[in-house]
Every structure is written in structure tokens, then in C-alpha cells.
């Protein structure tokens, strides 16, 4: 019996260490956002980096809030997110440093062609949200502390509203999910929602949704890469992480980002040289 | 449909299928190693806490995957008690999570089958001079069809699971992406038809595994 147990223990430990994967080349964990995965950008550009540097990049696609929390726990080596305020806190708490912007695009408000709140073809996000709230038209909120969710909350705050389905605003639907889930929900519930343009362009289940509000300077969507602070996170793979960061802001990385298109449309504008 | 065949024919997809099978089969194996003694001992032995063990094992049949995922996440996190193992966001973590979920299923089904057999044949076995411990192999052989069902039920739980492995595996492309997490991802990209197509492939694979196990199990009976 004890022999059998020993064998069992050996087998389990062996299997685990095998699966932990010591045999592969160097790898880093990049805590990033669902928008960069769902838009297809990282899948498109990272193989080029890996081929040139021999560093495998394991992408965790989480909302910005969760991605920063993952990195703060020490479970990632590099952060690539899009919520300036949350990033400020992350850096102020000593988790990260040397923030660099790598690209930008913009957020848009999408909704059905019927447009009950009459916000179509306008360029003022705050006015559009005010009209949606006044019409009590269905609006899908991410509600997941992602970068997109944070921007949406800032927009509501700016117009002095705080819609909440718990407080009786049945038109405001907090789904607690990723961008794709929110778009699927909006398509299914005939609702408005705020989305980043990258995820929107690559999203295949648009149904009758279309862009209604765009071009508001307040809807700029900036993506920043942040290194982990070696003082607080001595075990992170700083050297490899820095190489990916340097590649992303290098002319090669920047042109790879700019070259990514879906249906002929450019999704991300490289901005390392001239942050927006 | 073009999307579907391009995806299914790709090397990435083969890796996803292999990982799904590898993780789920090894998790099932681990669940059997743990579940067999856990289910067999309260069936044939009388010890303090025996009833409690049976109640707990049966209660854990409804273990919520996302809670298992979260608990394991906190344990395996760099700052957690098992952080030194460096298992978070690896297939090893996914295997552990699935094994935790499948073990109660295996244990409960093994217990049910062996308890019935022990009631029916325990007396006869003891008259033949067998101790409870030495009767276990005989009982297992008698109940081998039930054991097969227990193993397949455990496998069914692991291969179909998404909540726990999403949390501890991270759905990393080419590394911890399985059939179920790939389906979740395609759904979030709005590729609903592709997601559903992958779902049918998953069901097919799951059925193939069951059929193979049954064929092997029945072959041994004859």
C-alpha cells in the first residue's frame, strides 16, 4: 500500500512538473485586455516578435481591472491595458513603471437602426447618453471594471447620472461580461452599448447593430504597456518583458500594429512616437 | 462554413484537441486514483466519520466549477500558499482543477456500487475468510461496469468544464486553450456558427472516448 502510494505521488509530481512546461523556450505572461484579443491584434503581431526573439508570449485576455489585479498579485510579467486612471493607481501603488503608449483607436456607441433615442450620426457621447437615459432606451453596460467599463462610468459621471438596474433603471443592463458578450447581448436585446472600435470591426455577430455615435474627442482609446516594478515584483521576467515592450514601441512593432486591418480597415493607430 | 473547415484543419486546432484530451484524461486518472479509495473505504469499512464522509462526498457532487477555479487560483497565485509551484496559467493547474471537480463524482458512484455489492456478497466473502480490505479487488471486479460508468462520468465532467479552467488556465492561445475555452472565445468574437461547430466536434470526441471505453470494458467481460 505505501509503495503504491509512493508510486502514485511520484506519478503526480512527474506529471505536474511535465505540464508546468520546463521544456519550452523562454516565455512571458502578458496581462492584456479582451479588446486586444477579440480584435485579433495580438494574434496577428506576436508571432513576428516570437520568431525574431525566441520569446513565447502567453496572452491573458482579461478586462483592464482584472489584468492589473493579476499583475499586482505577481502572476504576470508585463501589462498592456487601456484605462489611464486605473493605470495611474497601479503605478502609484508601486506595481508598475515606465508606461509607454503603443497605439490608439476610439470608442463608438452602437445600437439598432431604429434608434429610439435618436442619437444616430451625432458626435457627442455625453449628449447621446443623456438622450438614451431620457428615452429609457435599453443600454448594455459591461459592468466588469474593464477599460471600456471605466470610460462608460466616467461619461455617466460627467453628465451627473448614475444609472443602475438595482435602483430601478430597468433599461440599464449591467451584464458583467467582456466586450464580445456585451455586443452579443446588445444584438439580442436591441440595446445600445459602448464598444472599442477594434472589437467592433472584428465582431462577426453584428446582426442589426451599427455605429451611431463616433468622432467625439472624449472617446479616444489609448493602449499603454507598463513594465512591472522590480522592487515589488522581483520574480517577474523583467528582461524578456522589456524586450517585448521595446519591440512594441520600435519601428518594427509599430508598423506591425499599423498594418493590421480587418475588411480593409485599420484597427489601431501606432502612437509610440507621438502619444495621443 | 469556410471558417469552420479552416479552423478544424489547422495545426492550432489539433493542439487544442490534444490539450483538451490530455488534461481531461489525466484529470480523470487522478480523480480515479483519489476517488476509488474515497468511495471504497466507506463501503466496506466501519470507522468514525464514515457517514459524514459519505454525506460530504455526495454534497460535493454539486461543486461549482467557478468556485473551485477561484480557490485554486488564490492558492496557486504567486502570493498564494502554493505559488512556489509556478502552476498558475499552466495545463497542470487545469488538470488539478478538473480532478478536484471529478473526484466526488467518481467517489460517490464507486461508493454506491460497492456498498450494494458489499451488502449482497460481503457475508459470503467473509465466510470464505476474506478481510474487508482483501475483498475490495473482488468487489471491484464484480462491479467493473459500474466502475466504468464512474470513470466516464468523471471524464464527462472534465471534458465539458469551462468555468474553472478559464480562471486557472487563462485560455492562453497555443498553451492553455482547450475546446471549451476556444468555444467561449469564438462566442465572444461573435463567431457563433464556428463556436457551435467546435461544440459538435467536442461532443463527437467525447462520444468517441466513451465508445472506446465501453468497447474495452465489454471486451474484458467476455
Image (cartoon, helix red, strand yellow):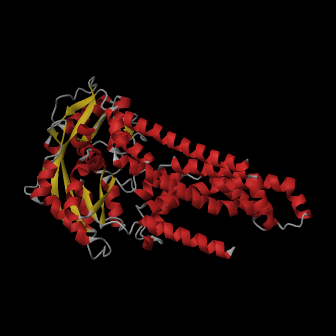
Q: Position of residue A91 (x, y in %)?
A: 24, 66
Q: Position of residue A147 (x, y in %)?
A: 27, 51
Apparent side of residue A6 relative to residue B2 in the rendered image (left or right): right
- What's the residue at 39%, 36% (across, down)? A169
Determine the residue located farthest toward the top in the rendered image. A114
- Residue A47 in view in this figure: yes
Query: How many numbered marks are there?
Result: 0
Classify A243 as above or below B24. below
- Between residue B219 and residue A56, name the one nearer to us: B219
Q: Quadrant of residue A230?
A: bottom left
- Residue A171 in view in this figure: no
- Between residue B154 and residue A135, name the one nearer to us: B154
- What's the residue at 45%, 69% (across, down)? A17
Apparent side of residue A77 relative to residue A276 in the rendered image (left or right): right
Indicate the quadrant containing the N terminus of chain A: top left, top right, bottom left or bottom right: bottom right
Classify B47 as above or below B66. below
Q: Quadrant of residue B215?
A: top right
Q: Position of residue B129 (x, y in %)?
A: 89, 67
Q: Position of residue A45 (x, y in %)?
A: 21, 52
Determine the residue located farthest toward the left in the rendered image. A274
- What's the residue at 77%, 62% (across, down)? B136
- Between residue A5 and residue A191, name the one nearer to us: A5
- What's the residue at 54%, 55% (across, down)? B25
Q: Quadrant of residue A246?
A: bottom left
Amino acid at each position: 500500500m505505501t509503495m503504491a502510494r509512493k508510486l502514485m505521488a511520484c506519478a503526480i509530481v512527474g506529471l505536474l512538473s511535465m505540464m508546468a512546461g520546463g521544456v519550452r523556450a523562454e516565455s512571458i505572461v502578458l496581462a492584456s485586455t479582451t479588446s486586444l484579443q477579440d480584435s485579433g491584434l495580438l494574434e496577428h503581431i506576436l508571432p513576428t516578435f516570437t520568431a525574431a526573439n525566441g520569446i513565447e508570449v502567453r496572452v491573458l485576455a482579461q478586462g483592464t481591472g482584472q489584468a492589473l489585479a493579476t499583475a499586482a498579485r505577481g502572476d504576470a510579467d508585463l501589462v498592456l491595458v487601456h484605462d489611464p486612471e486605473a493605470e495611474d493607481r497601479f503605478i502609484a501603488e508601486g506595481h508598475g513603471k515606465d508606461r509607454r503608449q503603443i497605439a490608439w483607436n476610439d470608442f463608438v456607441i452602437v445600437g439598432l437602426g431604429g434608434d429610439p433615442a435618436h442619437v444616430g450620426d451625432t458626435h457627442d457621447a455625453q449628449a447621446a447618453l443623456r438622450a438614451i437615459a431620457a428615452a429609457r432606451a435599453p443600454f448594455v453596460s459591461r459592468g466588469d471594471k474593464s477599460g471600456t467599463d471605466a470610460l462608460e462610468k466616467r461619461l455617466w459621471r460627467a453628465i451627473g447620472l448614475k444609472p443602475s438596474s438595482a435602483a430601478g433603471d430597468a433599461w440599464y443592463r449591467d451584464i458583467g461580461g467582456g466586450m464580445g458578450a456585451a455586443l452579443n447581448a446588445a444584438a439580442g436585446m436591441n440595446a445600445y452599448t459602448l464598444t472599442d472600435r477594434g472589437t467592433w470591426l472584428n465582431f462577426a455577430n453584428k446582426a442589426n447593430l451599427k455605429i451611431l455615435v463616433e468622432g467625439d474627442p472624449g472617446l479616444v482609446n489609448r493602449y499603454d504597456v507598463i513594465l512591472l516594478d522590480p522592487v515589488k515584483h522581483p520574480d517577474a521576467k523583467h528582461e524578456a518583458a522589456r524586450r517585448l515592450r521595446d519591440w512594441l514601441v520600435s519601428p518594427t512593432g509599430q508598423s506591425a500594429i499599423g498594418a493590421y486591418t480587418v475588411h480593409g480597415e485599420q484597427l489601431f493607430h501606432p502612437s509610440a512616437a507621438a502619444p495621443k | 462554413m469556410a471558417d469552420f473547415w479552416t479552423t478544424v484543419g489547422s495545426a492550432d486546432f489539433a493542439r487544442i484537441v490534444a490539450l483538451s484530451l490530455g488534461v481531461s484524461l489525466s484529470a480523470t486518472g487522478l480523480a480515479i486514483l483519489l476517488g476509488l479509495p474515497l468511495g471504497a473505504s466507506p463501503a466496506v469499512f466501519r470507522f468514525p466519520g464514515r457517514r459524514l464522509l459519505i454525506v460530504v462526498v455526495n454534497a460535493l457532487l454539486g461543486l461549482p466549477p467557478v468556485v473551485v477555479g477561484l480557490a485554486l487560483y488564490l492558492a496557486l497565485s504567486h502570493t498564494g500558499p502554493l505559488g512556489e509551484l509556478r502552476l498558475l496559467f499552466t495545463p497542470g493547474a487545469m488538470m488539478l482543477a478538473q480532478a478536484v471537480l471529478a473526484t466526488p463524482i467518481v467517489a460517490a458512484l464507486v461508493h454506491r456500487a460497492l456498498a450494494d455489492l458489499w451488502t449482497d456478497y460481503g457475508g459470503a466473502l467473509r465466510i470464505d475468510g476474506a478481510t474487508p480490505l482483501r475483498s475490495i479487488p473482488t468487489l471491484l471486479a464484480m462491479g467493473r461496469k459500474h466502475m466504468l460508468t464512474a470513470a466516464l462520468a468523471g471524464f464527462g465532467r472534465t471534458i465539458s468544464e469551462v468555468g474553472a479552467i478559464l480562471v486557472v488556465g487563462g485560455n492562453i492561445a497555443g498553451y492553455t486553450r482547450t475546446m471549451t475555452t476556444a468555444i467561449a472565445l469564438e462566442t465572444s468574437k461573435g463567431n457563433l456558427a464556428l463556436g457551435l461547430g467546435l461544440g459538435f466536434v467536442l461532443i463527437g470526441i467525447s462520444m468517441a472516448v466513451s465508445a472506446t471505453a465501453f468497447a474495452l470494458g465489454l471486451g474484458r467481460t467476455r
